[in-house]
Image: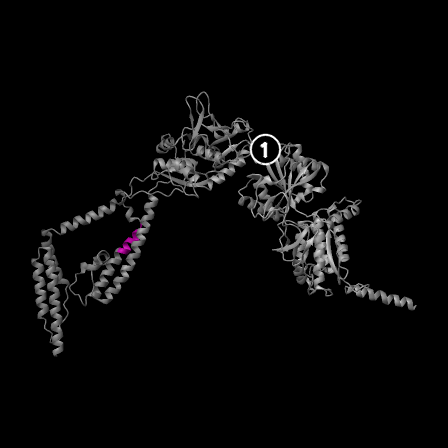
């Protein structure tokens, strides 16, 4: 019974010791480490074996260490399974670090959990640039990132003098970072990417993409995909003849690292392919590990072979073990989050208190591992040397190396002290290219296989500024001129290959010599293989793209409606009265009278001699001659300011309304649809008018030139012409430039198109090259020069044909005839009133009026009224004898003197009294 109790006590002591991380044999602390791998794959089997060997080798070499890594493995083959396994390791096992998982999609989810729990995630195989230690601090990459090979790839291309490349990559979404980085690297190295092809795991899709690439002019390909997919791509490429003479293939380390895991069929298809991968220096320890691996994995299922990912996993275990030992025994538990009701496993996940310290120790670890120098910079392994290999026979051969300081070299370590960076491929060993040849492939080939390019050209009667056919009377050969021709010629100069002088073939009826049909009929010839491409002002339309391919648009277009400006015939000569209504005119007149009477009343105390009639027109006179119509009373001035402000608002309103009326009245616009319309002969606009705008076809007429447009619009619908023209803006702009902007006007809505471009046979490889050349041409000054040459105008860089502004005409005499009649009539009346006979009549009437309406103020006691009497007598006498305008001035002066004398006399009397 005692023995049983003693055994139970010993058992519980051992369990307690292990729970604290203590080994019952020697007091060594076990540190829990998670391992996430796919144990059903050859890679997972190989990696697990390397990790076990690394753990054994490390602690055999360091028997006195106080800590020991204890691995807890989770099987994973998908991202969701990896995340679930990581969550279980962090929450239940409370591991201090996690090794793995194998792929980048799995690593993304696990890294998020590691950041949450502050546990380092050490990956030896997730090489995608989409996951970066700079973005995720707890992510450590002990492998080479796929972006680390960019400089080596571009240097190899420069050494082989390749300026064009097509990138073939795996369509998983995790290659985006590499594609972005390699595109930037190629641009800096002046290497043009001719195209990109995303390949999936579907065999039919692989063949479809390869056939497209075969039709293209480029013959050099960069392959970035896993070895599993890459082997299938090369097998299919050989089947369709793309692994023969004239082709060059380079694969990144994504495939090169696992070259030894490919089957014989794939290796046989890849003969002549170049590859780049991190260089692994030879060593006794590496050779010993390989022998052990071969024995251990000889009977493994699935079959596994040691590769560089196993070496990186091996070195990662050593780095992790060193970091843990420097920290010392770890006995603390995770810091748990407060439990909340209905909280998810992610929300309740605790955090490791030693995680930040362990992370720092791992990042600072340096040693010479099996894969080379172990040195982490910014959280990922630095690769100092890349190996350039060559697939030959059923194996591989190293032909050279690349280093950051020396460039290309034949040996990994240079024997000389030269600091020159080499970009010459001559230092590499001899290469046997695909097709069993030593002739280096060129980076392009003529898609037309040496045949003369057949170019279809329309026969145009008008708008030849765009394209015009000319025939040599001696050779009978055709040439083209115009805007489209100049664009085409310039594009040919930008192609990566040379095309001999094309053969221009007119699309014309041999009997009449005129066009053989519409532009749709012209494009039909591409389907019939009559032409290789069409050079003309062809509009890119969705329905046309179903049967032919188009280049990138070299000019933006839209369909607009053009109408002739119809001016009014001056039927309303009283248009100047229209801005204000009749009741407002009456109000203004009454306001003038009332304002005059008010000012007269206010002025009466200081200016009693002013006549009643003058104050009636005084408000109007003060607007025209304010300096000649002064008032003396301060209250009069205040009222006059209010009147001037009111009058100013009325005048501005009048001016604005009159301007609006004249602007609208200058055009005779019709609110209804044009009754008869025209369009350019052979254009797609005809189908647009019928199918989209629903015009009556019987009311539509086609015209071939700007001259016919002008004649038709001038006649109008009733005289055999049209009311409006529908055409694309570039043609309308040329028409307006020819016939004047004051006679025609754009109206209605515009209808966008795909622009003008060149048309090709469906699937033509020339389309992408010419599109690239047009893009380069558009961004240069050559496009502007071509437009100026053909159209004679300065165009904006953003809009080749700027928006046509609204045109207005000058106001004619008839528009203001009523105003002139009124002004003239008043002038004539003023002339009659200024005649001598009328002045005498006016003097007598004025005298009688003054006697009736001048009211002298009653004199105060003791006031001498003699001065006033003398002034009145003088004024009366002068008015009765005045026959010349000069006498009016003397009358006013005498009146002012009399009033001054009256005021002086009153002041003296008051002072004396």
Quadrant (top left, top right, bottom left, bottom right) of the N terminus: bottom right
- Residue at the spot 13% in from the left edge and 60% down from the top edge: 849
Residue 213 position by quadrant: top right
**x%, y% of residue 578?**
30, 48
User: Residue 196: x percent and y percent?
Assistant: 59, 40
Say which element carries label 1: helix
Q: How many marks?
A: 1
- In the picture as drawn, the residue positioned furthest to the front comes out as 416
The residue where tag 1 is placed is 215
* Vertical relation: 14 (above or below) 35: below
Q: Position of residue 507 (x, y in %)?
A: 47, 26
- The span picked out in magenta is 579-588
Left or right: residue 509 versus residue 346 is: left
Most distant residue in the top direction: 511
Viewer-side residue, 506 vs 540: 506
Of 876 and 513, the residue lying toward us: 513
Q: Main secondary structure of the magenta part?
A: helix
Up-down relation of residue 90 to residue 467 (above or below):
below
Looking at the image, residue 169 sits to the left or right of residue 649; the answer is right
**Do we see residue 673 in this rendering?**
no
Q: Quadrant of the C terminus?
A: bottom left
Residue 583 is a magenta residue: yes
**Residue 558 image-quadrant placement:** top left
Q: Residues within 10 Å of mark 1 (few under 14, many from 20)?
A: some
Residue 698, by quadrant, is: top left
Colour scheme used in the picture?
Answer: one colour
Up-down relation of residue 358 to residue 294 (above or below): below
Q: Nearer the viewer, residue 208 or 652?
A: 208
- At horizontal 21% and vertical 48% (from top left) the residue drawn is 823
Using residue 426 as the reference point, say whether residue 30 is left or right of it: right
């Amino acid at each position: 019974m005692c023995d049983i109790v003693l055994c139970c006590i010993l058992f519980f002591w051992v369990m307690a010791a292990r729970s604290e991380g203590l080994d019952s044999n020697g007091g060594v602390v076990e540190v829990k480490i998670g391992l996430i791998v796919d144990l059903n794959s050859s890679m997972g089997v190989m990696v697990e074996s390397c990790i076990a060997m690394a753990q054994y080798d490390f602690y055999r070499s360091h028997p006195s260490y106080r800590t020991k890594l204890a691995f807890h493995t989770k099987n994973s083959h998908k991202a969701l399974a990896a995340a679930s396994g990581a969550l279980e390791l962090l929450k239940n096992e409370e591991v201090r670090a996690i090794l793995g998982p194998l792929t980048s999609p799995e690593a993304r989810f696990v890294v998020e959990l590691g950041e949450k729990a502050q546990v380092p995630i050490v990956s030896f195989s997730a090489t995608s640039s989409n996951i970066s230690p700079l973005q995720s601090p707890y992510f450590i990459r002990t492998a080479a990132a796929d972006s680390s090979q960019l400089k080596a790839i571009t240097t190899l291309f420069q050494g082989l003098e390749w300026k064009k490349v097509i990138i073939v990559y795996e369509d998983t979404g995790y290659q985006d970072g590499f594609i972005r980085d390699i595109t930037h690297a190629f641009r800096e190295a002046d290497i043009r990417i001719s195209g990109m092809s995303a390949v999936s795991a579907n065999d039919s899709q692989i063949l479809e993409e390869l056939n497209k690439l075969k039709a293209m002019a480029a013959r050099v390909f960069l392959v970035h995909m896993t070895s599993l997919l890459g082997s299938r791509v090369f097998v299919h490429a050989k089947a369709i003849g793309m692994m023969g003479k004239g082709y060059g293939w380079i694969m990144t380390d994504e495939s090169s690292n696992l070259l030894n895991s490919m089957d014989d069929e794939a290796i046989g298809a890849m003969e002549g392919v170049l590859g780049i991968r991190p260089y692994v220096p030879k060593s006794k320890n590496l050779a010993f590990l390989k022998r052990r691996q071969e024995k251990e994995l000889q009977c493994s299922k699935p079959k596994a072979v040691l590769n560089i990912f196993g070496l990186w996993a091996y070195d990662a275990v050593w780095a992790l073990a060193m970091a843990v030992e420097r920290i010392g025994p770890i006995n603390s538990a995770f810091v748990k989050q407060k439990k909340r009701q209905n909280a998810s496993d992610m929300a309740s996940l605790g955090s490791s208190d030693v995680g930040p310290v362990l992370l720092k120790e791992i990042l600072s670890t340096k040693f010479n591992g099996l894969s080379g120098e172990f040195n982490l910079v910014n959280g990922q392994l630095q690769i100092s040397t890349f190996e350039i290999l060559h697939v030959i026979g059923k194996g591989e051969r190293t032909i050279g190396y690349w280093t950051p300081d020396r460039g290309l070299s034949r040996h990994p370590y240079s024997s000389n002290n030269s600091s020159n960076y080499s970009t010459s491929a001559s230092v590499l060993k001899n290469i046997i290219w695909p097709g069993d040849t030593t002739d280096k492939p060129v980076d392009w080939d003529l898609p037309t296989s040496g045949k003369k390019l057949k170019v279809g050209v329309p026969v145009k009667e008008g708008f030849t500024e765009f394209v015009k056919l000319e025939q040599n009377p001696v050779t009978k050969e055709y040439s083209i001129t115009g805007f489209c021709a100049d664009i085409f010629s310039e594009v040919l100069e930008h192609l990566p290959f040379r095309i001999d002088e094309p053969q221009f073939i007119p699309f014309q009826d041999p009997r009449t010599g005129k066009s053989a049909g519409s532009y749709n009929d012209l494009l039909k010839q591409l389907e019939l293989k009559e032409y290789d491409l069409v050079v003309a002002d062809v509009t890119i339309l969705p329905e046309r793209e179903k049967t032919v391919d188009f280049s990138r648009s070299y000019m933006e277009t839209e369909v607009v409606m053009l109408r002739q400006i119809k001016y009014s015939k001056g039927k309303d000569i009283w248009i100047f009265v229209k801005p204000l209504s009749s009741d407002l005119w009456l109000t203004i007149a009454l306001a003038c009278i009332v304002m005059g009477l008010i000012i007269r009343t206010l002025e009466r105390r200081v200016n009693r001699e002013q006549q009643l009639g003058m104050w009636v027109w005084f408000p109007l006179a003060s607007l025209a001659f304010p300096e000649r119509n002064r008032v003396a009373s301060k209250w009069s001035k205040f009222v006059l300011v209010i009147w001037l402000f009111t009058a100013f608002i009325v005048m501005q309103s009048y001016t604005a309304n009159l301007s609006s009326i004249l602007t609208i009245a200058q055009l005779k616009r019709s609110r209804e649809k044009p009754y008869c319309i025209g369009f350019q002969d052979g254009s797609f606009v005809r189908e647009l008018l019928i199918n989209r705008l629903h015009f009556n076809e019987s009311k539509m007429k086609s015209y071939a030139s700007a001259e016919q447009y002008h004649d038709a619009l001038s006649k109008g619908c009733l005289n055999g012409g049209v009311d409006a023209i529908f055409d694309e803006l570039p043609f309308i702009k040329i028409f307006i430039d020819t016939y004047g902007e004051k006679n025609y006007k754009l109206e209605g809505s515009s209808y966008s198109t795909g622009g003008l471009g060149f048309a090709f046979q469906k699937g033509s490889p020339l389309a992408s090259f010419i599109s690239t050349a047009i893009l380069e041409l558009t961004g240069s000054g050559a496009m502007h020069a071509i437009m100026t040459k053909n159209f004679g105008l300065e165009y904006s860089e953003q809009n080749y044909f700027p928006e046509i502004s609204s045109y207005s005409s000058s106001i004619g005499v008839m528009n203001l005839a009523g105003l002139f009649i009124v002004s003239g009539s008043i002038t004539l009346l003023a002339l009659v009133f200024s005649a001598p006979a009328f002045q005498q009549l006016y003097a007598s009437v004025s005298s009688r009026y003054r006697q009736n309406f001048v009211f002298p103020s009653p004199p105060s006691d003791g006031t001498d009224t003699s001065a006033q009497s003398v002034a009145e007598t003088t004024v009366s006498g002068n008015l009765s004898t005045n026959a010349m305008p000069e006498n009016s001035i003397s009358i006013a002066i005498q009146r002012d003197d009399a009033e001054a004398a009256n005021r002086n006399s009153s002041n003296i009397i008051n002072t004396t009294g």
